[in-house]
Image: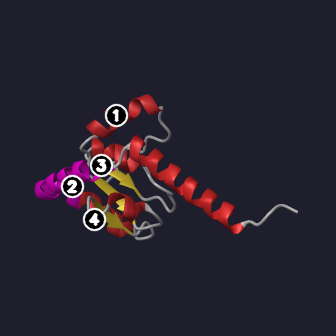
């Protein structure tokens, strides 16, 4: 697939929207991601996503991506071929991705983080006795 796969390396953040919009797919075979902002950005741009089955990645993308084992190179290549050659799959992934990202926003992320911090701080206050 050398004629259709471009490995771009690290790119400036400002370039990312153009790269997502111009890509046939975002392939993300990462072994570890705690959340995966690039996945959300790609889905928001209408780019089909192929992502690994590791850590929080499947939870982040839900059913809006093709999930693969990053250790199975053949499966990864097959997923790329399927997304490239199957217009119905591409369209389903684009629609599902755009629907999926509606649940993510900086406001909801900050609200969730604040709730966790408040919960932990209340728990610590309740579980500590008077200072010696």
Q: Is residue 84 magenta?
A: yes
Marks 2 and 3, how far apart in space? 9 Å
| Residue 4 in the image, given as x and y percentages of width and height | 29, 47
Q: Local crowd at mark 3 within 10 Å, few (<14), some, or many (≥20)?
A: some
Q: Residue at x 40, y 47 (%)?
A: 108
Front of the two marks 4 and 2? 2
- Res. 28 in view: yes
Marks 1 and 2, how far apart in space? 19 Å
From the image, tell me which residue sits under label 1.
Answer: 17
Front of the two marks 3 and 1? 3
Give the prevailing secondary structure in the magenta stretch. helix
Question: Quick one: label 1 or label 4, which is nearer the N terminus?
Answer: 1
Q: Secondary structure at mark 3?
A: helix
Question: Quick one: label 2 or label 3, which is nearer the N terminus?
Answer: 2
Front of the two marks 1 and 4? 1
On the rendered structure, is 103 left or right of 82? right
| Residue 106 in the image, given as x and y percentages of width and height | 41, 41
From the image, tell me which residue sits under label 3.
Answer: 101
Marks 4 and 3, how far apart in space? 26 Å
Q: Secondary structure at mark 2?
A: helix
Q: Residue at x 45, y 67 (%)?
A: 54
On the rendered structure, is 49 left or right of 129? left
Question: Quick one: label 1 or label 2, which is nearer the N terminus?
Answer: 1
């Amino acid at each position: 697939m050398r004629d259709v796969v471009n490995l771009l390396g690290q790119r400036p953040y400002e370039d990312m929207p153009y790269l997502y919009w111009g890509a046939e797919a975002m392939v993300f075979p990462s072994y570890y991601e705690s959340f995966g902002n690039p996945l959300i950005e790609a889905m928001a741009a209408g780019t089909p996503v192929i992502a690994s089955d590791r850590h929080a990645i499947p939870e982040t993308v839900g059913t809006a991506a093709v999930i693969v084992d990053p250790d199975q190179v053949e499966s990864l290549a097959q997923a790329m071929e399927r997304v490239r050659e199957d217009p119905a799959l591409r369209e389903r992934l684009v629609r599902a991705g755009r629907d999926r990202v509606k649940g993510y926003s900086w406001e909801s992320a900050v609200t969730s983080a604040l709730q966790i911090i408040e919960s932990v701080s209340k728990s610590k206050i309740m579980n500590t006795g008077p200072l010696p």
